[in-house]
Image: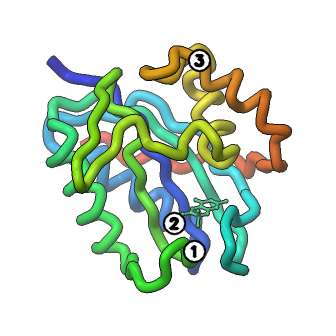
């Protein structure tokens, strides 16, 4: 049975919008996978200790028959293809693809934690996620993501308009 998965995408180097659209295209082209919803792209301040350029962030939903591990491997391969270099922890990046949720699956392996352990505390994830799935709840706590967002005292995230959707083959 296909599962619905949510993926966060971000970029803060080079042509950020083009990287987001390329990442979206890579995921949409995966076998047994199709795009269900794509949020706007949001201009966001960098979270974390490193001074770096602002990010463009979005979240999208897919329906996929790929299991979580091959899906994660495909996301890492797409990052690599688009010049992502993991040099500085929490540093700037051309393309970041994070698997947030895979149905209601709870996973704690060496490579993958589901739900994503920080998703409920990051406005750059919650704002686009609540745009495309306003009634979605955290699979472990049962709390709606909209409630997490409301409690955050949200740092501004500015919608910059829709991303270009990949052509349907
Ligand atoms: N900050 C923002 N605004 N957006 C991101 O995608 C992002 N990604 C990260 C860190 C460095 C934590 N900060 C971020 O990995």
* Residue drawn at point x = 68 percent, y = 38 percent: 127
> Image point 35% across, 38% down: which residue?
114
Q: Name above or below for residue 23 compared with residue 65.
A: below
Closer mark to the observer between disc 3 and disc 2: 3
Q: x, y (%) of residue 84?
A: 39, 76
- How dense is the environment of label 2, judged by Cα within 10 Å: few (below 14), some, or many (20 and up)? some
Marks 2,1: beta carbons within 8 A: yes
Which residue in the protein does label 3 denote? 143
User: Which quadrant does ligand 1 occupy?
Assistant: bottom right
**Residue displayed at 39% across by 58% down:** 23
| Residue 19 vs residue 127, the one in the foreground | 127
Task: Tell me the residue that label 2 is attached to.
Answer: 18
Left or right of 168: which side holds 36?
Answer: right
Q: CA distance from mark 3 to mark 1?
A: 36 Å
- What residue would you read off at disc 1? 15
Q: Bin the neighbour count of mark 1 within 10 Å (Cα to Cα): few under 14, some 14-19, many 20 and up.
A: few
Quarter in which the N terminus is drawn:
top left
Q: Is residue 145 above or below residue 128?
A: above
Give the CA distance from mark 3 to mark 2.
34 Å
Q: Secondary structure at mark 3?
A: loop
Q: Is residue 119 found left or right of 70 in the rendered image?
A: right
The front one of 161 and 142 is 142
Q: Position of residue 31 (x, y in %)?
A: 14, 42
């Amino acid at each position: 049975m296909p599962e619905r998965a949510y993926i966060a995408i971000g970029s803060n180097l080079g042509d950020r919008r083009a990287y987001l659209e390329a990442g979206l295209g890579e995921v949409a082209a995966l076998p047994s996978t199709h795009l269900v919803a794509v949020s706007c792209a949001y201009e966001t301040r960098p979270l974390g200790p490193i001074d770096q350029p602002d990010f463009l962030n979005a979240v999208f939903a897919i329906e996929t028959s790929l299991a979580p591990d091959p899906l994660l491997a495909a996301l890492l391969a797409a990052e690599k293809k688009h010049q992502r270099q993991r040099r500085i922890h929490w540093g700037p990046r051309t393309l970041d693809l994070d698997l947030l949720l895979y149905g209601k699956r709870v996973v704690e392996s060496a490579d993958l934690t589901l739900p994503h352990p920080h998703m409920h505390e990051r406005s750059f994830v919650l704002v686009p996620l609540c745009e495309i799935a306003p009634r979605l709840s955290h699979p472990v706590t049962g709390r709606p993501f909209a409630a997490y967002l409301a409690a955050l005292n949200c740092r501004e995230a500015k919608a910059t308009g829709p991303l270009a959707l990949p052509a349907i083959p």
